[in-house]
């Protein structure tokens, strides 16, 4: 009866998103709060998982976000390029109670842009908003930096959960929007130029390590850069 075209349902989106920022700003707790609704008061939680895959719904589509967390390598400035490879989104996290972690944001952005596409969707995250009395970085300063660097901005608390889902959703939704636009553009191009797919201009969403990720709207392969 409702024999809708099956392809709408079988599309599979997987976006790699990385968490970066200084040690102890709350990256691992943002992820555990988001993916499992758990919080760890002491910081030894960061062991084991390389990444966590989380299903999300954006515009009625099921999207999987593959969210990468460091295993504490940031302490030794030894995050490898494999960590960044193929990332299409990034949460750059600082701690609103430690000015130094905010000052280091530009260092993290440099590193991100060295290792990944310039077009990676980025959100600046001021975490620990629950610690109001200990605040060292104003919301205005956070906003201003984000604006200057073309990032989204949000303040979160992994402790009391505020804005945690929103932070991840903002990034994933924007990636999805960019993707949708590129699909539409490529379909337009295809109409104008029947050779388009064959002439080497196929755009790919994922880096080479993302072989498992597939996403094939009718136009063929997809998107960013
Ligand atoms: N008050 C408060 N503490 C937090 C918050 N997020 C993380 N923490 C604490 O900050 C410490 C470092 O967190 P962790 O997630 O391990 O930071 P990471 O090194 O960036 O992964 C831990 O003791 C956490 O319990 C938050 O939103 N509010
Ligand atoms: Mg951690």
Image: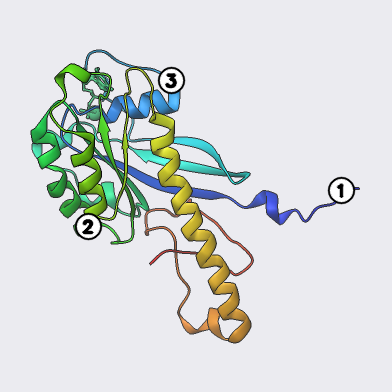
Q: Which residue is mark 1?
A: 2
On the image, the x and y values in percent for residue 4 come to 80, 53
Q: CA distance from mark 2 to mark 3?
A: 31 Å
Could you say whether the residue bearing mark 1 is in a helix, strand or loop?
A: loop
Q: Is residue 97 above or below residue 189?
A: above
> Given the current orientation, which residue lies at the most extreme front position?
140
Badge 2 or badge 3: first in the primary sequence: 3
Q: Position of residue 173 (x, y in %)?
A: 48, 47
Crowding around mark 2 (Cα neighbors within 10 Å: few <14, some 14 to 19, many 20+) is some
Q: Position of residue 97 (x, y in %)?
A: 15, 25
Disc number placed over residue 113 in the picture, else none = 2
Q: CA distance from mark 3 to mark 1?
A: 37 Å
**Which residue is rendered at x = 18% and y = 43% of the image?**
79
**Residue beneath the point at 43% across and 31% down:** 165
Of the numbered discs 2 and 1, the one sitting upstream in the chain is: 1
Sequence-first tag of 3 and 1: 1
Q: Label 3 belongs to which residue?
A: 37
State which quadrant residue 96 falls in: top left
- SS of the residue at dot 2? helix
Q: Quadrant of ligand 1?
A: top left
**Can residue 76 be seen in this snapshot?**
yes
Q: Position of residue 107 (x, y in %)?
A: 12, 48
Check the image and tell me how it is coloured.
rainbow
Mark 1 sits near ligand 1, with its Cβ under 8 Å away: no
146 relative position to 160: left or right: left
CA distance for labels 2 and 1: 46 Å
In the figure, 181 relative to 192: above or below? above
């Amino acid at each position: 009866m409702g024999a809708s075209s099956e392809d709408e349902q079988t599309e599979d989106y997987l976006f790699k998103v990385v968490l970066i920022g200084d040690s102890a700003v709350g990256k691992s707790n943002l992820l555990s709060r988001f993916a499992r609704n758990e919080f760890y008061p002491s910081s030894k939680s960061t062991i084991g998982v390389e990444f966590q895959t989380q299903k999300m719904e954006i515009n009625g589509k099921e999207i999987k976000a593959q969210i990468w967390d460091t295993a504490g390598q940031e302490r030794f400035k030894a995050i490898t390029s494999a960590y960044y490879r193929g990332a299409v989104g990034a949460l750059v996290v600082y701690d609103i109670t430690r000015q130094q972690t905010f000052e280091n944001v530009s260092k993290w952005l440099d590193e991100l842009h060295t290792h990944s596409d310039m077009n990676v969707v980025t959100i600046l995250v001021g975490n620990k908003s629950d610690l109001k009395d200990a605040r060292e970085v104003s919301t205005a300063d956070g906003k201003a930096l984000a604006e200057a660097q073309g990032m989204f901005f949000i303040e979160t608390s992994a402790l009391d959960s505020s804005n945690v889902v929103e932070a991840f959703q903002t990034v994933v939704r924007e990636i999805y929007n960019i993707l949708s636009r590129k699909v539409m553009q490529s379909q337009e191009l295809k109409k104008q130029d029947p050779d388009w797919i064959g002439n080497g201009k196929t755009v790919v969403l994922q880096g080479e390590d993302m072989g498992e990720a597939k996403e094939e709207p009718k136009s063929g392969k997809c998107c960013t850069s």
